[in-house]
Image (cartoon, grey):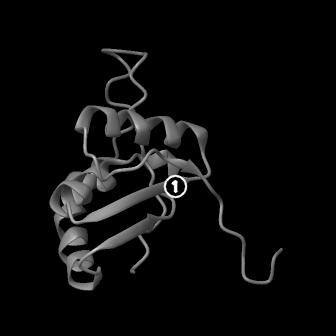
Amino acid sequence: MIPKAVLNQESVRLDHERRCPSDPRLHAPATARNRDAILTVLARFLPPTGLVLEVAAGSGEHAVHCVAALPHLDWQPTNPDGRAIRSIDAHRAVARLANLRPAMHWMPRPANGR
């Protein structure tokens, strides 16, 4: 699987902050521009069935977009940041996609264990 670049936290903004301060969904402006290109590449390499582990899922917008287009795959988003976890789960709740699992807090370690 081709890893998705980790979103720079400064590039992620909460569009709903002014309208609804309690809405935890983050929105990355680049998502609308690149989600179809990312999906096209992933669709060429992902298996016909299975579980996709998305490392550093950011806002969760790419996960929702990919899961909706790839219903034959289960999708496990992860992120080390609590704010991102809440955003992913909020996007998941709105999308109501059965194959999108709740976000997990996870930070991979380097191969040397440091």
Q: Going by the image, does 77 lie left or right of 68? A: right
Task: Examine the rendered structure and indicate whether residue 112 appears above or below residue 100.
Answer: below
Secondary element at image label 1: strand
Give the percent coordinates (x, y) of residue 34: 23, 63
Which residue occupies the foreground of this view, 32 or 56?
Answer: 56
Inspect the image, locate mark 1, and give the three-letter code of the amino acid beneath it: Thr
Give the percent coordinates (x, y) of residue 9: 51, 48
Tell me the crowding category of disc 1: few under 14, some 14 to 19, or many 20 or more residues within 10 angstroms, Cα based: many
Give the percent coordinates (x, y) of residue 94: 26, 32
Which residue occupies the foreground of this view, 84 or 95?
Answer: 95
Q: What residue appears at the point 80 percent right and 83 percent down from the top-left corner? A: 112
Q: What residue appears at the point 34 percent right and 47 percent down from the top-left corner? A: 28
The quarter of the displayed image where residue 22 is located:
top left
Task: Examine the rendered structure and indicate whether residue 33 appears above or below residue 94.
Answer: below
Q: What residue appears at the point 49 percent right and 47 percent down from the top-left corner? A: 103
Q: Going by the image, does 73 lie left or right of 81? A: left
The quarter of the displayed image where residue 50 is located:
bottom left
Instruction: Work out which quarter of the rendered image holds the C terminus and state it.
Output: bottom right
Instruction: Work out which quarter of the rendered image holds the N terminus and state it.
Output: bottom left
Q: Which residue lies most toward the right here?
A: 114
The quarter of the displayed image where residue 12 is located:
top left
